[in-house]
Image: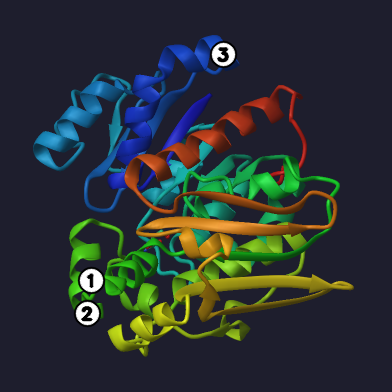
Amino acid sequence: MKIAMIGFGGVGQSFAEILEEKHQELQQNYGLDVEIVAISDVMKGSIFHPGGLNIAELLECVKRTGSVESYPSSSQTIKGWNSIETIEKSQADVVIEVTYTDVKTGEPALTHCHRAFETGKSVITTNKGPVALAYQELTEKADHHGVFFGFEGTVMSGTPALRLPLETLAGNEIKEMRGILNGTTNYILTAMESGMTLKQALEKAQALGYAEADPTSDLEAYDVRYKAAILSNHVYGVHLDPDEIFCAGITGLSVEDIKEAEKAGEKWKLLARISQNNGNVKATVRPERIKEDDLLARVSGATNAIVYECDLSGPIMLTGAGAGLKETGFSLLIDLIHCHKQKQGTKIGGGSHS
Ligand code: HSE
């Protein structure tokens, strides 16, 4: 399987490291032989080699020089393609789209997805924007071109919040999905329980690398609103415009509010709720005071969790990391393995579209 990587920041490099580490297991366990044939990154430059790049050498070169420019060239190496040229000319089977993208417009990731599908390539991305804004258009286009579209990492990174309800919980009617889908704000609310102010806790969350580049998206819950839109599209098959989802963040909460809830045996949590009733889907994102014995009240720090209210199996909770380089790199691998299985005709059903 030939891969072109569009974007080679922390997540992209982490994914490359995983491929390098797991090369043998992937071959032995899944018959999956992966080669990175191209990389294109606005900051680090671009490189293509039809026979595949040496991942260890590539990572070392980027870590040492901050660019792919000094990666050794041979007669077949091409440097300097932009992202679109890389998608069009690299003859990759799969485009891994991990660019720095504006979540409001979904660009440049949205254009990259379209161009990849139009040229017969599968796409695996962790970018929320294109999936939340153009789910239907993109999944239909992928179907039309007979390629795979994977985006497991857009909600709860490597914790499989999208694949689990459709595959493992298949057969249930899921009446509601209720979750803590943002690590930064849950980290802040937990830190405020021990008396830290929101500002102090945010600084710690930023230092630990959980927060978005602009933490407004975390604090005002726009990040969660996009994730709620993706869950609605993917699990319920109903498009909700992210802007139309009621959304309130945590900036109005003080340490006093948290202490007051504690005295009443409750906790403040930033919750997304997505529910369906007779085909009508509703979603809200806001801080809620929940009882201390609620399944979600015990989820602390940067951990994420989601409860699927199922008619047959009852409530099922999935919890794990919702951010992190390795975890998000892993989410790309889950999709890659499924893409490979699908190509081989051994798809295990549901999940990301074909
Ligand atoms: N800033 C996000 C979070 C990263 O804190 O959960 C993952 O989307």
Q: Nearer the viewer, mark 1 or mark 3?
A: 1
The percent position of residue 206, horizontal first and vertical second, equals 22, 64
Can see residue 190?
yes
Residue 196: quarter of image? bottom left
Amino acid type for the residue under numbered disc 2: Thr
First-in-chain label (3 vs 2): 3
Residue extending farthest to the right is 278
| Residue bearing mark 3 | 29
Q: Tell me which numbered mark, 1 or 3, is placed earlier along the sequence.
A: 3
Label 3 vs label 2, nearer the camera: 2
Q: Which residue is mark 1?
A: 201
**Residue count near mark 3 (Cα–Cα under 10 Å), binned few <14, some 14–19, many ≥20:** few
**Quarter, ligand 1:** bottom left
Element at label 3: helix
Residue 234 placement (x, y as % from top left): 69, 58
Disc 1 versus disc 3: distance between alpha carbons? 43 Å
Height in image: 52 above or below 314? above
Asked if one can make out residue 133 in the rendered structure from this viewpoint, the answer is no
Q: Determine whether the residue tagged by mark 1 lies in a helix, strand or loop.
A: helix
Could you say which quadrant of the image residue 301 lies in? bottom left
Amino acid identity at mark 3? Asn
Q: Secondary structure at mark 2?
A: loop
Q: Residue furthest left?
A: 64
Decide which of 349, 66 is in the foreground and name it.
349
**Of 312 and 228, which appears nearest the observer?**
312
Calculate the distance from the C-alpha at mark 2 to the C-alpha at mark 1.
Answer: 6 Å
Are the two marked residues, 2 and 1, in contact with CB atoms closer than 8 angstroms? yes
- Label disc, if present, on residue 122 of the rendered structure: none
Disc 2: which residue: 197
For label 1, count other residues whose C-alpha is less than 10 Å away and answer few (under 14), some (14-19) or many (20+).
many
- The residue under the point 63% across, 40% down is 120
